Image: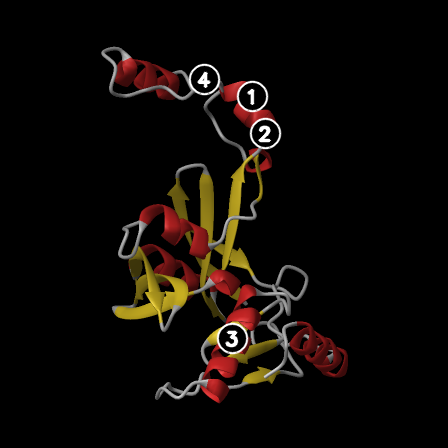
Amino acid sequence: MWRAEMVIAQDYWKITIQLRIFDGKEEAEFIAQKRSGHPVLTRYFDRPAIHVKVSGKPVHFYDSDIIIEEISEDKFAQMGPPIDSRVPDGPQRILNALETRDPRWMLKPSDMVPSSMTLDELLDRHGNAYSLQNVAWGVQEHTQDNCRHVIGSIGDYKIVDLKSPEIERHVRQIQEFNTTRRAVPHPGFMELTRFCINCGAKNDIEANGVRYMEIMKELGGY
């Protein structure tokens, strides 16, 4: 199986969106390179998301569908202060750095480290409907070893970690539905799965169920 990916550069962060998984490499390459684009920050049913057009259709990707990395502290120290393009010699200095491939400004995969940044925080920084910069596309072989195993779902939101902020959001919505006198839609149910929908790996559904109930108790329950 092959995973089509979109790569976004935003400030100090690299955002990799896992678009879809395909049986063939050529189909994954075609979708990633030719049939996906226009990433925009948004909120979809109160969830922070990135709206992307895939094969001409709008698709929303959440925190569980993306990987956010940031420039490491060591690389920041090597880069020094950013070049200001607004000063007279700024554009020329940027051009010189690119032409000479100045190692201070060239990023390698090892210069990027996992980030604690979330889509919610990016939305707070840039606002709703903010257009992101799609700088690259990629295709990766998808195996059980490199899969972010999906252990459950709430609607179309895939759960890869029971400590996800989405679990807390869902509990708050259920609590509001059960206690408010206003007419609010039911937020749906949390469904745990026996197998990962992306790679087929077996999940420990019993252990996940026990942990899920413990988290419910910690959050005050339904």
> Which of the numbered marks, if any, corresponds to residue 73?
2
Give the percent coordinates (x, y) of residue 121. Answer: 44, 51
Mark 3: give few (<14), some (14-19) or many (20+) Cα within 10 Å: some
Question: What is the three-letter code of the residue carrying label 1?
Answer: Ala
Which of the two discs, 1 and 3, labels the residue nearer the N terminus?
1
Mark 1: give few (<14), some (14-19) or many (20+) Cα within 10 Å: few
Would residue 172 be seen by someone viewing this image from the given angle? yes
Q: Check disc 4 and report its element: helix, strand or loop.
A: loop
Question: What is the three-letter code of the residue carrying label 3?
Answer: Arg
Would residue 188 be seen by someone viewing this image from the given angle? no
- In the image, 55 versus 175, the foreground residue is 175
Which of the two discs, 4 and 2, labels the residue nearer the N terminus?
2
> Which of the numbered marks, if any, corresponds to residue 102?
4
Say whether marks 2 and 1 touch (CB < 8 Å). yes
Which residue position is annotated with label 1?
A: 77
Nearer mark to the viewer, of 4 and 2: 2
Marks 1 and 3, how far apart at CA: 42 Å
Which residue position is annotated with label 3?
A: 172
> Which of the numbered marks, if any, corresponds to residue 166?
none
Nearer mark to the viewer, of 4 and 3: 3
Question: What is the three-letter code of the residue carrying label 4?
Answer: Asp
- In the image, 87 versus 39, the foreground residue is 87
Give the percent coordinates (x, y) of residue 213. Answer: 70, 80
Which of the two discs, 2 and 3, labels the residue nearer the N terminus?
2
